[in-house]
Image (spheres, rainbow, N blue to C red):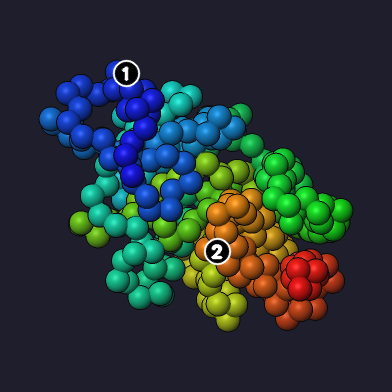
């Protein structure tokens, strides 16, 4: 796919570039327009920023690129978690280009992929975040859902009352559990998908794509990691235990984790539905949405958690079309 002329012109106007030789689109699951920019002396990664999340993404990228061994607390660590930031403004984030592949596309076995991701997650959670406190928001589950439903697909619009009830049910319980357990917030990536971790040719791992970052309890990042990567439910105990080995001060709140897992399945499904092109019959996004909502129903039934079943509205609509 060719790079749009307006995008090329915007990139060429940035002061960080001189003598651009090539610009190519990267289509590896990144949520925003991302490009490889080759100059005479160096290769860069450039990402078009979303107006709502630009400050969050830039703040996290700078923080993680500046991470050093003195910040590591109880973890052995590398010099940085993310590629070095070369340039940023409200429209673009430009970093060093990582020559390698996404963890999702690597040949590593599942347990090694999980271990790599948990290690990066634990390091992120231990970063000193004083300067980021005013720039990165606290996770508000109701607000996050509302943002996704600003321009909903026909399915979601039709069942808006039902979805509001689901949102309210999950939010009320999550907020109560946070208050009663006095769970502390850390900087959470919010989308540690295996596609958001890069492995370079030296087998070093890098964390990217921070537009979903929020301050929230550790359980939120663990839950989203489990949900977005479709990790089997019988691996949850191992994931919690392995995180605890990386951060010895961590004390798991399993009830909060369970509700965040439900919330993650729920909001992931909403995102996939909202990114389904109904006119084009986008089967992939629809399938991914169904998978997340089926996991929601299965997980809530397995733990006897009383929440509305999401697949009920899919089944009703399916019957209406026959």
First-in-chain label (2 vs 1): 1
Image point 24% across, 60% down: which residue?
A: 203
Image point 85% across, 58% down: which residue?
162
Which residue is tagged 2?
A: 283
Q: What number is the disc on residue 112? A: none
Residue 20 position, x and y percent, is: 20, 27
| Front-most of residues 138 and 294 | 294
Residue furthest to the front:
322
Q: Residues within 10 Å of mark 1 (few under 14, many from 20)?
A: few
Label 2: how many residues lie within 10 Å, few (<14), some (14-19) or many (20+)? few
Note whether residue 13 is visible: yes
Q: On the image, which quarter does residue 180 sit in?
A: bottom right
The reply to whether discs 2 and 1 touch (Cβ–Cβ < 8 Å) is no
Q: Residue at the location (47% across, 33% down)?
A: 49
Determine whether, in the image, residue 320 is placed left or right of residue 74: right
Residue at the extreme left of the image, as rendered? 40
In depth, the one of 105 and 253 nearer the eye is 105
Disc 1 secondary structure class: loop
Residue 145 placed where, x, y %?
72, 48
Would residue 276 be found to the left or right of residue 87 on screen?
Answer: right
The residue identified by callout 1 is: 13
Q: Is residue 162 left or right of residue 29?
A: right
Q: Position of residue 146 (x, y in %)?
A: 74, 44
Q: Quadrant of the N terminus?
A: top left
Residue depth check, mark 2 versus mark 1: number of the one nearer the observer: 2
Image quarter where the C terminus lies is bottom right
How far apart marks 2 and 1 lie (CA) works out to 38 Å
Residue 315 visible in the shown view:
no
Circle 2 sits in a helix, a strand or a loop, which is it?
A: helix
Q: Is residue 137 left or right of residue 203?
A: right
Residue positioned 55% across, 58% down in the render: 282
């Amino acid at each position: 796919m060719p790079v749009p002329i307006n995008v090329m012109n915007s990139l060429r106007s940035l002061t960080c570039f001189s003598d651009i030789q090539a610009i190519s689109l990267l289509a590896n699951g990144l949520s925003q327009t991302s490009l490889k920019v080759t100059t005479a002396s160096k290769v860069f990664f450039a990402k078009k920023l979303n107006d709502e999340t630009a400050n969050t993404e830039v703040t996290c990228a700078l923080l993680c690129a500046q991470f050093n061994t003195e910040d590591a607390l109880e973890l052995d660590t590398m010099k940085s978690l993310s590629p070095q930031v070369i340039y940023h403004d409200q429209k673009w984030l430009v970093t060093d280009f990582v020559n390698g592949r996404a963890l999702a596309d690597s040949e590593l076995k599942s347990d090694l992929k999980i271990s790599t991701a948990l290690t990066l997650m634990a390091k992120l959670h231990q970063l000193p975040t004083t300067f980021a406190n005013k720039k990165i928001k606290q996770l508000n589950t109701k607000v996050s859902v509302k943002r996704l439903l600003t321009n909903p697909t026909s399915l979601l619009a039709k069942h808006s009352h039902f979805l509001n009830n689901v949102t309210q049910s999950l939010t009320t319980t999550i907020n109560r559990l946070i208050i009663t357990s006095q769970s502390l917030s850390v900087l959470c990536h919010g989308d540690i998908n295996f596609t958001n971790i890069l492995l370079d040719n030296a087998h070093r791992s890098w964390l990217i794509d921070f537009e979903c970052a929020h301050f929230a309890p550790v359980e939120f990042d663990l839950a989203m990691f489990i949900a977005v990567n479709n990790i089997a439910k019988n691996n949850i105990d191992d994931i919690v235990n392995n995180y605890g080995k990386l951060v010895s001060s961590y004390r798991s709140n399993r009830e909060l984790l369970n509700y965040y897992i439900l919330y993650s399945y729920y909001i992931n499904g909403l995102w996939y539905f909202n990114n389904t092109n109904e006119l084009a019959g986008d089967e992939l996004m629809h399938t991914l949405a169904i998978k997340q909502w089926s996991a929601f129903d299965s997980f809530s039934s397995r733990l006897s958690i009383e929440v509305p079943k999401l697949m009920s509205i899919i089944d009703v609509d399916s019957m209406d079309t026959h």
